[in-house]
Amino acid sequence: QSALTQPASVSGSPGQSITISCTGTSSDVGSYNLVSWYQQRPGKAPKVMIYEDNKRPSGVSNRFSGSKSGSTASLTISGLQAEDEADYYCCSYVGSFVVFGGGTRLTVL
Amino acid sequence: QLQVQESGPGLVKPSETLSLICTVSGGSISSMSYNWGWNRQPPGKGLEWIGSIYYSGNTYFNPSLKSRVTISVDTSKNQFSLKLSSVTAADTAVYYCARGIVGATPLFDYWGQGTLVTVSS
């Protein structure tokens, strides 16, 4: 059982915006621990989309943005495209250990 | 361009030791800026961090696996390895090696393609 809770699934139509939440505790997300977000397309390795709560690696579309409030981090995808359909995982430290959220499947309708 | 690639047996018998190697090319494994980690994903399930090794040699493991995991680095070969002992069917998964950037967030920026390891007699 993951220490970081994500909704199992979200969906949206092309052009819309969606937000995926990642809820932790005061020991992880709610403390000084920052969050990263990974996208995983079927049969592929994960790809980092956001790190340190809200930073985008070079090459990642600015349609992807991250934020955090208290013990909940969020990933927002604006201008939804078919290629965004994938599984998304949040990730943070709990002490010296890495913890992934349970994952959210994004369906583009 | 950095590349990481897993290699090892795709089938391991129950109670035996799973051994995988990750070969790093296009960059040095010896850098204080990076750590080297293993993650896995059981079929149809989510990602699970197994553990990471730092330049200092310090290792950190998922508490649920700690008693069975060993991660080591061979700088002469630019490789790092994973050993998981006393495996059961629950250890069947795609295993990924990845480079982590040392910092305030778990940032694995380069991943291998993954290798499926099945535990079965």
Image (cartoon, rainbow, N blue to C red):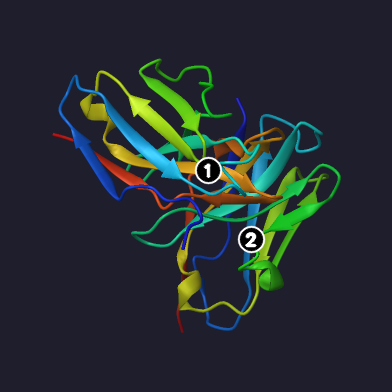
In the foreground, A24 or A53: A24
Return the x and y of residue A9 as percentages of the image width and height: 26, 46
Amino acid on which disc 2 is placed: Asn
The residue labelled by disc 2 is B62
Residue B49 in the image: above or below residue A88 = below
The residue labelled by disc 1 is A91
Q: Secondary structure at mark 1?
A: strand
* Residue A54 tag number: none
A71 with respect to A89 (left or right): right
Q: CA distance from mark 2 to mark 1?
A: 14 Å
B76 with respect to B89 (left or right): right
In the foreground, A77 or A29: A29
Return the x and y of residue A84 as percentages of the image width and height: 29, 30
Return the x and y of residue A26 as percentages of the image width and height: 59, 47
Q: Secondary structure at mark 2?
A: loop
Q: 10 Å neighbourhood of mark 2: few (<14), some, or many (≥20)?
A: some
Quarter of the figure that contains the C terminus of chain A: top left
Q: Residue at x 60, y 40 (%)?
A: B4
Return the x and y of residue B13 as percentages of the image width and height: 53, 80
